[in-house]
């Protein structure tokens, strides 16, 4: 979705990030970055007999008993090709996402840095501890939002692994926005700047400026299309039979409550939760459950609250924790879509990105980051942790 595609750290380089990890975590990041691919988790292996699929970032294994093991890897992927030229092609029904079946007992070999993952996804780098940060940040939010909406998380038996109830995913991504921002084709600011005054069924007033706070939080759903996210209105979702009216009412209410909670909690920690996307699914009993990831730096945009007004007054973009600087580096050094093999990202950039992820985890959860040990970063350790969660039917 567009929400995670941040406004950017500026073309001039990495830039300083006000959030720093604790000393211990920072040292672990440095050591892991120096270790190269061995210091990060590029791919996983599931227990024998557990069918697996590979997403952009996560590997999933079916454990039986309606359970799914999700391994969040350290893969940093540029998910989408540049948007198609306007005007948009006519709406078409959603197609299943491109997941690669992991055949045989062994998964395909770990992709070397720079190796394309599929026609659409470009693997940019392995970022140490990114998977752990995403996995544990999401688990933290899932634990503290269970009273808002039930979720599919069952356990986290390993820093990179979540065991989830396997749900039937609803074919829409529920994007919620508190600010008008972004640079991609589906970003609210891009659309508004082109003159759009009604986006996904939300009327927009005249006179908004980039990065303004919206009068109220808006839901701008997208369908889960293969090559790009396609914006859709709630009416469209129901008319096309993607989600029933009753389920949409439940899901949209839950999304707004989750987002308002996320904004309040982020604010207490000096962060602004700018936008995010949620995924929901139906469990075995047909009940709506929150699935996937919640308020992670991959699914959400966070800004630093303190500097926002000053920076905006000076005509600067808000300070954020995103990965735009890595994308900019690739854009400056190769053609990220045209070139068959991408260059390897510089170690300092990868290390900086890792530091930002870890610092965000510590800021949000208020807990010191406990980096996975090299022993835990092996395929064997992950397989073992998953195997212990298998439900014997
Ligand atoms: N509890 C769950 N039940 C079923 N599917 C899930 C659940 N949680 C997450 N998923 C799916 O698992 C996949 C996670 O892998 P990810 O790398 O994020 O994939 P993607 O490339 O589709 O974004 C997503 O397709 C998501 O919809
Ligand atoms: Mg995903």
Image (cartoon, rainbow, N blue to C red):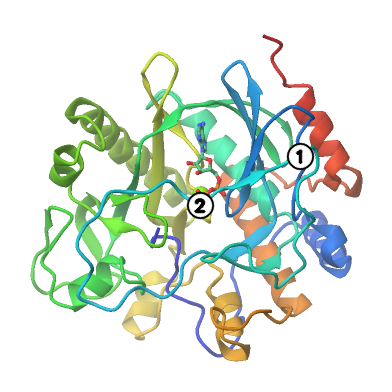
* Numbered label attached to residue 376: none
Q: Is residue 43 left or right of residue 148?
A: right
Q: Residues within 10 Å of mark 2 (few under 14, many from 20)?
A: some
Marks 1, 2: nearer the viewer:
1
Residue 184 % position (x, y): 36, 72
Q: Earlier in the sequence, mark 1 or mark 2?
A: 2
Quarter of the image where the N terminus is located: bottom left
Q: Is residue 38 left or right of residue 274?
A: right
Identify which residue is drawn at 75% across, 27% down. 49
Question: From what the image shows, is residue 229 above or below residue 327?
Answer: above
Q: Is residue 208 left or right of residue 168?
A: left
Question: From what the image shows, is residue 342 above or below residue 71?
Answer: below
Identify which residue is drawn at 69% across, 50% down. 73
**Mark 1 — residue?**
104
* Numbered label attached to residue 98: 2
Q: Quadrant of residue 391?
A: top right
For mark 2, give the secondary structure.
Answer: loop
Residue 9 shows in the view: yes
Identify which residue is drawn at 21% across, 31% down. 249
The answer as to whether callout 1 falls within 8 Å of ligand 1 is no
Return the residue nearer the eye: 306 or 113. Answer: 113
Residue 361 % position (x, y): 62, 50
Q: Residues within 10 Å of mark 1 (few under 14, many from 20)?
A: few
Residue at the outermost front position: 104
Identify which residue is drawn at 43% across, 62% down. 305
Residue at the outermost top position: 393
Q: Are marks 1 and 2 in contact (CB under 8 Å)?
A: no
Return the residue nearer the eye: 283 or 265. Answer: 283
The answer as to whether callout 2 falls within 8 Å of ligand 1 is yes
Question: From what the image shows, is residue 252 above or below residue 295?
Answer: above
């Amino acid at each position: 979705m567009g929400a995670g595609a941040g406004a950017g750290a500026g073309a001039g380089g990495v830039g300083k990030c006000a959030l720093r990890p604790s000393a211990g975590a920072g040292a672990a990041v440095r050591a892991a970055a120096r270790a190269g691919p061995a210091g990060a988790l590029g791919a996983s292996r599931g227990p024998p007999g557990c069918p697996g699929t590979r997403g952009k970032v996560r590997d999933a294994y079916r454990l039986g008993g309606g359970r799914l093991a999700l391994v969040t890897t350290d893969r940093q992927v540029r998910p989408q090709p540049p948007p198609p030229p306007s005007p948009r092609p006519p709406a078409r029904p959603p197609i299943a996402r491109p997941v690669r079946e992991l055949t045989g007992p062994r998964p395909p070999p770990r992709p070397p840095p720079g190796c394309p993952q599929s026609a659409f996804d470009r693997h940019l780098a392995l970022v140490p501890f990114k998977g752990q940060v995403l996995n544990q940040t999401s688990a933290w939010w899932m634990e503290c939002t269970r009273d808002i909406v039930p979720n599919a998380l069952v356990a986290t038996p390993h820093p990179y692994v979540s065991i989830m109830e396997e749900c039937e995913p609803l074919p829409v991504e529920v994007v919620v926005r508190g600010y008008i921002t972004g640079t991609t084709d589906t970003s609210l600011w891009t659309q508004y700047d082109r003159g759009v005054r009604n986006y996904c069924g939300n009327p927009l007033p005249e006179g908004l400026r980039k990065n303004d706070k919206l009068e109220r939080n808006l839901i701008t759903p997208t369908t889960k299309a293969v090559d790009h996210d396609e914006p859709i209105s709630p009416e469209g979702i129901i008319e096309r039979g993607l989600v029933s009216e009753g389920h949409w009412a439940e899901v949209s209410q839950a999304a707004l409550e989750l987002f308002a909670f996320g904004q309040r909690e982020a604010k207490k920690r000096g962060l602004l939760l700018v936008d995010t996307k949620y995924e929901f699914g139906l469990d075995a009993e047909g009940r709506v459950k929150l699935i996937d990831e919640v308020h992670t730096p991959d699914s959400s945009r966070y800004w630093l609250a303190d500097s926002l007004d000053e920076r905006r007054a000076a005509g600067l973009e808000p300070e954020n924790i995103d990965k735009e600087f890595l994308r900019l580096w690739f854009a400056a050094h190769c053609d990220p879509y045209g070139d068959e093999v991408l260059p390897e990202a510089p170690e300092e950039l990868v290390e900086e990105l890792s530091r930002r992820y870890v610092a965000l985890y510590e800021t949000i959860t208020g807990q010191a980051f406990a980096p996975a040990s090299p022993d835990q970063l092996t395929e064997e350790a992950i397989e073992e942790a998953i195997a212990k969660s298998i439900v014997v039917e």
